[in-house]
Image: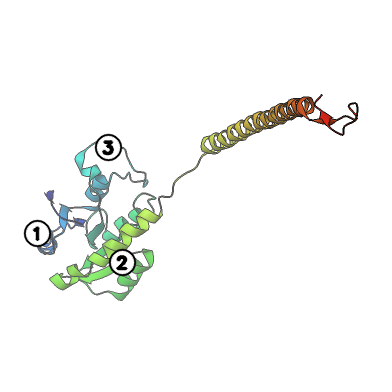
Amino acid sequence: MAVVTEAQFHVLAVDDSLIDRKLIERLLITSSFQVTTVESGSKALEFLGLHEDNQKTPSASLQHEIEVNLVITDYCMPEMTGYDLLKKIKKSSAFKDIPVVIMSSENVPSRINRCMEEGAEEFLLKPVKLSDVNRLRPRMLEGRSNEKQRLPRNIDDNDVGASCSSVAAKDSIISINGGRNSANISGSKRKAGKEEEEVGLLHERIRPRFSNNNGGGGFTVL
């Protein structure tokens, strides 16, 4: 297994032929991809952390922490063909959005159609050329975008309950403050009425009153 780092996209290349693995690795590196090469479909599943039943296995190893943006695999391999590997990846909920490209030295239309119907992004004829590899970048961008869209924020019942409790608490505070404000307004009105009454009495005491007691038409302040 060979790993080359420091590239934007990571490609998992699968081929049982050492010569073909070296060739596809060199082409991918030339196109500035990060590359991991394995020699069989079972090794590819192991690298992805998949069981034979398509369940992702927990692993703390470095290789499972590396994001895989594309899988390119030979069609004719012993034990597990590229077509079988394609089906297992597409049935996995964790990796179904990863683009899978099939390579083959044989141009068999029925084989090509079967792979495309199963979800392969492309079917490349060997020997793979640099122009073929350069066409893969848009596929990886599309696969990464689809994977991000599949990760919405999950809202559980606890979140909803907490939100409802928060709203209820706010309503209670508003209700209490409203009652206090009403009480303050009523108290202010009573205080203002009392002050107006005291001012009225004061005016009544000092208000001049006319009196005819002196017969001269003057007035007396009472």
Crowd band around label 2 with a 10 angstrom C-alpha radius: few (<14), some (14–19), many (20+): some
Residue 196: quarter of image: top right
Q: Secondary structure at mark 3?
A: loop
Q: How is the image coloured?
A: rainbow
Separation of residues labelled 2 and 3 (CA atoms): 28 Å
Q: Looking at the rendered structure, which numbered label has been put on residue 8?
A: none
Give the residue number, with chain letter if any, for mark 3.
Answer: 59
Separation of residues labelled 1 and 3 (CA atoms): 28 Å
Q: Residue at x 36, y 54 (%)?
A: 148
Q: Viewer-nearest of labels 1 and 2? A: 2
Residue 191: quarter of image: top right
Residue sticking out furthest to the front: 216
Crowd band around label 1 with a 10 angstrom C-alpha radius: few (<14), some (14–19), many (20+): some
Q: Looking at the rendered structure, which numbered label has been put on residue 22?
A: 1
Q: Residue at x 51, y 39 (%)?
A: 156
Residue 117's x, y, as percent?
38, 68
195 up-or-down from 20: above or below: above
Q: Is residue 127 visible?
A: no
20 up-or-down from 65: above or below: below
> Would residue 99 be found to the left or right of residue 32 on screen?
right
The amino acid beneath tag 2 is Glu
Q: Is residue 150 visible?
A: yes
Crowd band around label 3 with a 10 angstrom C-alpha radius: few (<14), some (14–19), many (20+): few
> Would residue 116 be found to the left or right of residue 104 on screen?
right
Give the residue number, with chain letter if any, for mark 2.
Answer: 121
Residue 129's x, y, as percent?
14, 71
> Would residue 180 be found to the left or right of residue 78 on screen?
right
Sooner in the amino-acid sequence: mark 1 or mark 3: 1
Residue 175's x, y, as percent?
65, 33
109 up-or-down from 20: above or below: below
Q: Residue at x 23, y 65 (%)?
A: 137
